[in-house]
DNA sequence: ATGCCTGCAAAGCTTTTGCAGATGC
DNA sequence: GCATCTGCAAAAGCTTTGCAGGCAT
């Protein structure tokens, strides 16, 4: 017996996500969603994504990338982060909330959740009389990856 | 007996801070430092500061404000934050490290430190093999100030 | 068929930079 | 007096918007 595990025509699952979000299923949207789903680095800037599109021989303008990402954000499909380098990065919303720790040298981004931190934040907000809507915790540091400082050397 | 508590000619303390930072004591620098020291809201954007300068009848260009703030940042006098609204805000470095909680409605920013959060961050970084250089935690929410939603109504 | 999308180009916003004149030391 | 600093204007980078044509439904 053979079980077909991932019978997914191109645009199938993505199409459903898009339709659920009330968006027409178009090439730019499907492609961008695919890129975000299959990205090695889950945190991409608009330019990163467009570079990827160019690689894939997709003729999609940067303006469209921004428009699509903004729509995705509104639909809750992606989250927009502003790390300290000014440029916005987008991340597919899969799995629950998490925070980020990123390497100053190579740009490596890792995700984590710490229940105690989450808990203490609620306590702090409570004490100060705030009703938490959202929060962003980013730790900056140096990672110990073998190929770290990679980006440092290629773009000095 | 009379003790003179704050015998500070204009530019006195600021001048020392500036000289210590290796910066010439000039009008723009002194004024901007004064504004940051006396600000009700310790977190100001470049534009906020320039508006203040205009109020004080100081003819100082926005470019200079940015230049001075960048120098102050390099000298460790101020910290530049990028909250999620895109515009950078600057804060005078007084007192130890702290995190921020800010109101989505009125822009009210409060500061806090939570030893447990700090501690857990070190633990997380350690587990993931990062050497922490810095971190930014911002909680976004709704505050319960009597005059909250103030900014919401003035700039809709 | 029609109303939502896209590409292109142009504008918008914050921030930076070049240059000639001004200013602190 | 000389190097540093400032003001102005122009440029730069990221992101958004206007418009005419294209595409999904």
Image: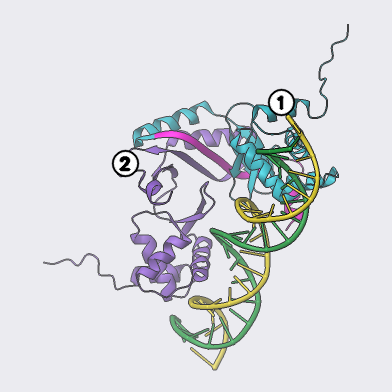
Chain colours: A purple, B cyan, C yellow, D green
Q: What residue would you read off at disc 2? A: A145
Label 2 resides on the chain identified as A
Quarter of the image with the N terminus of chain A is bottom left
- Relative to A2, is B99 above or below? above
Q: How many marks?
A: 2
Q: Name the one closer to the observer, A74 or B28.
A: B28
Q: Residue at x 60, y 31 (%)?
A: B112
Left or right? Give the position of C15 relative to A5: right
* Residue B18 in which image quadrant: top right
Marks 2/1: CA–CA distance: 43 Å
**CB under 8 Å between callouts 2 and 1?**
no
- Dot in front, 2 or 1: 1
* Residue B75 in which image quadrant: top right
Question: Residue A57's spot in the image, x, y percent?
Answer: 36, 74
Label 1 resides on the chain identified as B
Is residue A129 visible from the viewing direction of this image? no
Q: Name the one closer to the observer, A88 or B140.
A: A88
Q: Is residue B141 magenta?
A: yes
- Helix, strand or loop status at disc 1: helix
Is residue A29 visible from the viewing direction of this image? yes
Q: In the image, which residues are magenta?
A: B131-156
Q: Is residue B53 magenta?
A: no
Q: Residue furthest left?
A: A1
Question: Residue D16's spot in the image, x, y percent?
Answer: 61, 65
Q: What residue would you read off at disc 1? A: B16
- At label 2, counting other C-alpha atoms closer than 10 Å, the crowd grade (few under 14, some 14-19, many 20 or more) is few
Q: Residue at x 34, y 35 (%)?
A: B129
Q: Residue furthest right?
A: B1
* Residue C18 in which image quadrant: bottom right
């Amino acid at each position: 017996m053979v079980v077909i595990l991932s019978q997914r025509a191109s645009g199938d699952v993505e199409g459903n996500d898009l339709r659920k979000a009330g968006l027409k299923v178009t090439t730019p949207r499907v492609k961008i969603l695919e890129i975000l789903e299959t990205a090695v680095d889950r945190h991409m800037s608009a330019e990163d994504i467009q570079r990827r599109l160019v690689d894939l021989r997709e003729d999609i303008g940067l303006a469209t990338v921004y428009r699509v990402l903004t729509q995705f954000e509104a639909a809750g499909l992606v989250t927009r982060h502003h790390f300290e380098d000014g440029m916005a990065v987008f991340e597919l919303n899969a799995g629950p909330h998490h925070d980020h720790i990123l390497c100053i040298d190579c740009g490596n981004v890792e995700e984590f959740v710490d229940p105690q931190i989450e808990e203490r934040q609620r306590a702090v907000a409570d004490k100060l009389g705030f009703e938490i809507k959202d929060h962003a915790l980013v730790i900056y540091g140096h990672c110990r990856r073998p190929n770290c400082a990679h980006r440092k050397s290629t773009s000095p």
